């Protein structure tokens, strides 16, 4: 009997945070990227909840780059979080996987994508939950203070976990895995910076 999907999702998220090497080794054997997509979808759900909460309280980002009114931006972003985050994960995984493969990596693309989905989603879920907790405890000012700490920490954490996932899945050296992860994350960050606030 197989484990229910939600149980496997929770176990893999916890595993990515507490025992990432073993978790990524298991995910790297997945025949489909679907588990990674599930982790990204959960991140999108949590992030959307935070954004709707901010919008409903009348908050708006300080600036926007897209032609969307600032007072509606958080709502629009919440509605677009799933496709945006899915696209950013796909860009990160595609570029990171290709670089590692060109450097002699042995990982199969679906498993690499699955592992990178959890490497990306798990720290970002912690970040979003920290921001939500800060907002509920102290309002928008507390959220801004928390974000100054949790966003850089989560970004570094995603990089470390992505590098580990590539090392485990592709069996490449640390310099290759760190560089491949950095390249993938840099490109997705530049793209995400156009939308995410």
Image: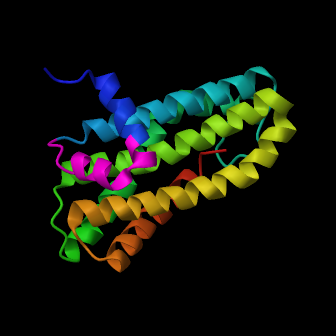
- Identified at 42% across, 32% down, the residue is 41
User: Quadrant where the N terminus lies?
Assistant: top left
- Residue 29 counted in the magenta span: yes
Here the colouring is: rainbow
- Identified at 70% across, 38% down, the residue is 131
User: Quadrant where the C terminus lies?
Assistant: top right
Examine the image and state in which quarter residue 49 appears.
top right
- Residue 16 counted in the magenta span: yes
Residue 114 lies, with reference to residue 102, above or below; the image says above
Q: Nearer the viewer, residue 33 or 24?
A: 24
Residue 104 at x, y percent in the picture? 18, 75
- Answer with left or right where residue 20 lies relative to residue 137: left
Q: Nearer the viewer, residue 146 or 191?
A: 146
Q: Is residue 95 visible?
A: no
Residue 64 at x, y percent in the picture? 71, 46
Magenta-highlighted residues: 15-31
Examine the image and state in which quarter residue 14 appears.
top left
Q: Is residue 8 visible?
A: yes
Residue 72 at x, y percent in the picture? 71, 28
Examine the image and state in which quarter residue 183 appears.
bottom left
Residue 34 at x, y percent in the picture? 26, 36
């Amino acid at each position: 009997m197989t484990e229910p999907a939600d149980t496997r999702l929770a176990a893999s998220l916890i595993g990515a945070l507490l025992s990432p090497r073993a978790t990524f080794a298991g995910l790297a054997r997945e025949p489909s990227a679907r588990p990674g997509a599930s982790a990204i979808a959960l991140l999108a759900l949590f992030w959307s909840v935070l954004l709707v909460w901010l919008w409903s309280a009348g908050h708006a980002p300080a600036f926007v780059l897209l032609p969307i009114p600032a007072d509606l931006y958080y709502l629009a972003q919440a509605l677009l979080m799933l496709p945006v985050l899915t696209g950013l994960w796909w860009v990160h995984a595609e570029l990171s996987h290709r670089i590692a493969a060109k450097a002699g990596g042995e990982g199969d693309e679906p498993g690499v994508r699955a592992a990178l989905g959890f490497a990306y989603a798990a720290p970002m879920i912690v970040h979003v939950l920290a921001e939500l907790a800060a907002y509920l405890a102290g309002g928008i000012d507390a959220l801004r203070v928390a974000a100054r700490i949790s966003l850089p920490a989560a970004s570094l954490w995603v990089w470390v976990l992505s590098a580990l996932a590539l090392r485990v899945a592709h069996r490449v050296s640390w310099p290759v895995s760190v560089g491949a992860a950095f390249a993938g994350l840099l490109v997705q960050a530049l793209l995400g910076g156009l939308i995410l606030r």
